[in-house]
Amino acid sequence: MKRTADVLLGVVLLAAAAAGLLAPGPGAAPGEALDVLLGSGTEGATVAVLGVRLPRLALALAVGAALALAGASLQALLATPLADPFLLGISGGGAAAATAAVALLPVAAFGAVPAAGMAGAALATLAVWWMARGPLGPSTTRLLLAGIAVNAAASVAILAVLALADAPRLASALAITMGSFSAATPAAVLWLLPYLLLPAALLLHDGRDLGLLALGEESAAALGVDVTAVRRRVFLASAALCGGAVAFAGVIGFVGLVTPHLCRLIWGMAPRRLFWRAALAGAALTAFGDVLARQLVAPAELPVGVVTAALGVPFFVALLRRAP
Amino acid sequence: MLLLWAAVAFSGHLVDQVGHPVQAGPVTRLVALAPDVVELAFALGAGERLVGVAGTADFPVAARLLPRVTVGDVESIMARRPDLVLATTAGNDPRVIERLRASGVRTFTADVTSCERLAEVLRLLGEVLGARRRGDELADDVLGRCAAAARRAADLPGQGALWVVWWEPPIVAAPNTFHHDLLHRAALTNLAPEGAGRYPRVNPEVFLDPGLRFVVSPDEPDVRAGWERFATSAAGTRLAAGDVQVLWLPADPASRPGPRMPEALEALVAAREARR
């Protein structure tokens, strides 16, 4: 069963990647795009497929993997199925700083918006960690409450920016709050990779300890787990994943919440087994979401966050109704 | 038009361009909630009756000296004690207009999506402001200039175009906008999608569409800066290479569905002629 599911996951991921490159678009029809991949495409189609779609697909895959991995690790760390990258305020902090940058910076300096998003996510991370600290270290409850507080502050900041921004800039600000891969460039993908690969390596390293934490803090400590250190590392790794994702693609909902649930149903709770599969499933979900965002009202484009939420909400409701 | 005139004849009041009846009566205190309707008021000779305007109103120069209102704040508008509030579908919140109407304030909302609709609003507003002859003159002038520009453009080859109002992300003008009407009159086929709203965000790949020959954009610093950044991306390859030509139009006439709209059309046709 699990082996079949692994094969299916690989097939779905490949299908998502193929759809991302081959789906019809104004720059290249599917046949023309296929010619490009086979090395015989026209110049225009080559630019469309390799210059526009490939970085877009790569960013969608990287962001989806980051969000799903962050969701899976936070759900394991906080021992609650409700945890996702948004709950801890990290995405909100990144989005607030990025929308503020869009409202305040000259358009010529919009290249600095991802850096602002990253700084906002880092500040939100520090704020949550600082608020959550207690005499015995940051407990799960304190982390959640601090995250809710930071999230609320970030939402207020985003709404204030949207209310005060010049009308033309609202389009740029809304693209951040609802997610988009349309501005993807090879440079953006290269910038994002360290924020994906290093935290992923850290989380896979801490997978065993996270699995023991699921037994309870006392039990984990009795089995030799440095609970505070593991919690700090996992929290910071998840924050880096969320911050990178929101800085380059804006807020994309439900990927970090739904994907780990689905994967847990199939592959079980063990973090080391779950994490990399959740990352691949998240990558496939955002890549498919982006294809739908481009196709549903083509050549107009929907925000990808709208599509992932539209896919995620019914699925989540179904999961909730089936749960004992 | 016939229906509107019938409405005037039989009910004793006018209907604005979104279907709201406008009670007859003198207008001495006028508030205008957008730059395009400020320009309409001045064009009709009612500038002196303006007691409040949107913060972005800057034309004609006299508009810059007028008291400002916060266009989304009913209290700020009511504080000017207007007997008529002018609004537009191009930027005003319809809920604010509904609250003003519910408070007993007369409102007139313009919805200019073509030269004909601009002529219509000039006639209607001329009637409301007691400047019927001026309104008719301006309306005839608008229709004449639009027709003349379209005749000039008839000699130009029909080609694909997009009217880009913002570049990051790319937002274009779709059918049922005055931009679309101006493109059509300039013998350009608007490649923007239908059915996704008046100003949809588009897949950046549309700028690689081989059928696209022109991009029209208002010549504003922010828009130009966005274009410069976009032209460095892969999707901007044809723009950077000059395969797709950018026609920069005077910013305000190209962005405001007001009385200077024919200027934008004339500039568009002239730009096309220059590149023939």
Image (cartoon, rainbow, N blue to C red):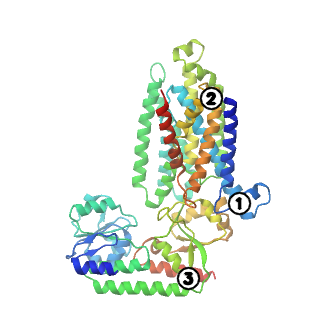
Query: Is disc 1 on the same chain as disc 2?
Result: yes
| Residue at x-position 20% and y-position 64% | B104
| Residue A221 makes an appearance in the image | yes
Circle 2/circle 3 CB separation < 8 Å: no
Q: CA distance from mark 2 to mark 3?
A: 66 Å
Q: Is residue B26 left or right of residue A57?
A: left
Q: Residue furthest right?
A: A39
Question: Where does the image place residue A170, in percent across and percent down from the top left?
Answer: 46, 56
Query: Dot 2: within a 10 Å radius of its alpha carbon, few (fewer than 14), some, or many (20 or more) residues?
Result: many
Gap between marks 2 and 1, in whole Å?
40 Å
The image position of residue A35, as x and y in percent, is: 76, 58
- Residue B128 seen anywhere in this rendered image of the structure: no
Q: Which three-letter amino acid code belongs to the residue tagged 3? A: Ala
Kindly indicate the quadrant of the structure image that contains residue B55: bottom left
Q: Residue at label 2?
A: A267
For the residues bearing labels 2 and 1, Cβ distance under 8 angstroms: no
Q: What subunit carries mark 1? A: A
Total marks drawn?
A: 3
Dot 3 lies on which element?
Answer: helix
The crowd level at tag 3 (other Cα within 10 Å; few <14, some 14-19, many 20+) is: some
**Residue matched to label 1:** A47
The circle on residue B270 is: 3
Which of the two labelled residues, at mark 2 and mark 1, occupies the earlier sequence position? Answer: 1
Q: Is residue A201 above or below residue A158?
A: above
x and y percent of residue A162 in the render?
Answer: 42, 52
Q: Nearer the viewer, residue A308 or A179?
A: A308
Residue type of the residue flagged with mark 2: Trp
Judged by depth in the image, the label closer to the viewer, 2 or 1, is 2
